[in-house]
Amino acid sequence: MRLTFFSAGALRCIILIAVAIVVPITFIGCGSSAFSKPAASRAPTASMLAQTASVPPILLFNGTGTLSADVSAWETILKNLELSYATANSSAMNSMTVTKLKTYKLLIVPGGNSRTIGKYLTKTATANIHNAVQAGLHYLGICAGGFFGGYSIYNGLNLTSGVWFNVYHNGGKGTGITAVEISYPNNTKLDQLWADGPEFAGWGSIAGKYPDHTPAVAEGKSGLGWVILCGFHPEAPASWRNGLTFTTSAAADNAYAGKLVTAALNGTSLPHF
């Protein structure tokens, strides 16, 4: 039996909350009540699409526990890629069958609080998502979505055959919002926004590494589905960088977010170590 004692941050991601006009963005702990409100979206919802014959290839989860600012950031990435998508909140996800989930090619779960995401989904819902991935639905999990994709006592998806993940401790510097240099197999490096995200030791192929060489991006098969887990926020817009020092542009980081979506959607492998 493997026993691990988690720090308070191990099962959470520090999140980004947009507030007021004076301060573009504020960073608060994942346990905040800010997660009580589902993210807003202008995309068609899964329930709306139930009335039509048209189903887009991507389902973006925006339920309780996700961060509305991060959902919006991913919507921007998807729109820039000219990809159609639908959104589903917790209630909609709780009502989805495996058959319905399989009508989509890719499920994206963005940043937020993995424990809260699991709390507001039924065990039937997470089992249905798990089984849909086994049957061929692809999955992209970002930060909290990465935690949620692994094994967790907090109603996680367990797309990783029992492997769970700890928070990356940023080289002993403690937790919090910062720029972290991510290394890629093609000998390139990008400073990416990190917010108490996971490292993915013990599962999949490594497509990106933190400075201590622990996995920052991991990918692999889960049944017939393709799973990509990312511990940082490549989708972060430039406005989230206030007060932080980056050596790479937001545009370069956002381009990597697009690569993650494209690979996950098509079920193709990223370059890996």
Image (cartoon, helix red, strand yellow):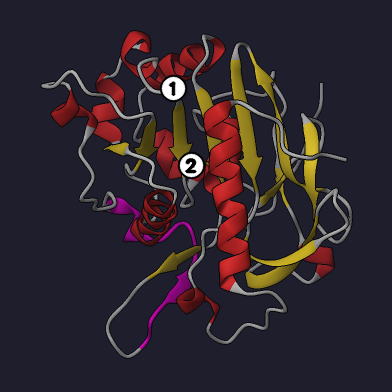
Residue 256 seen anywhere in this rendered image of the structure: yes
Q: Nearer the viewer, residue 66 or 123?
A: 66
Q: Amino acid at mark 1?
A: Thr
Total numbered badges shown on the rendered structure: 2
Q: Is residue 129 magenta?
A: no
What percent of the width, then of the height, locates residue 106?
46, 29
The answer to whether 9 is drawn above or below residue 144 in the figure is below
Name the residue at the left extreme.
Answer: 51
Which region is colored magenta?
23-36
* Residue 115's disc number: 2
Image quadrant holding the C terminus, namely top right
**Residue drawn at 54 percent across, 36 percent down:** 140
Q: Tell me: 61 left or right of 89.
A: right
Circle 1 or circle 2, nearest the eye:
1
* Residue 126's disc number: 1
What percent of the width, then of the height, locates residue 155?
49, 28
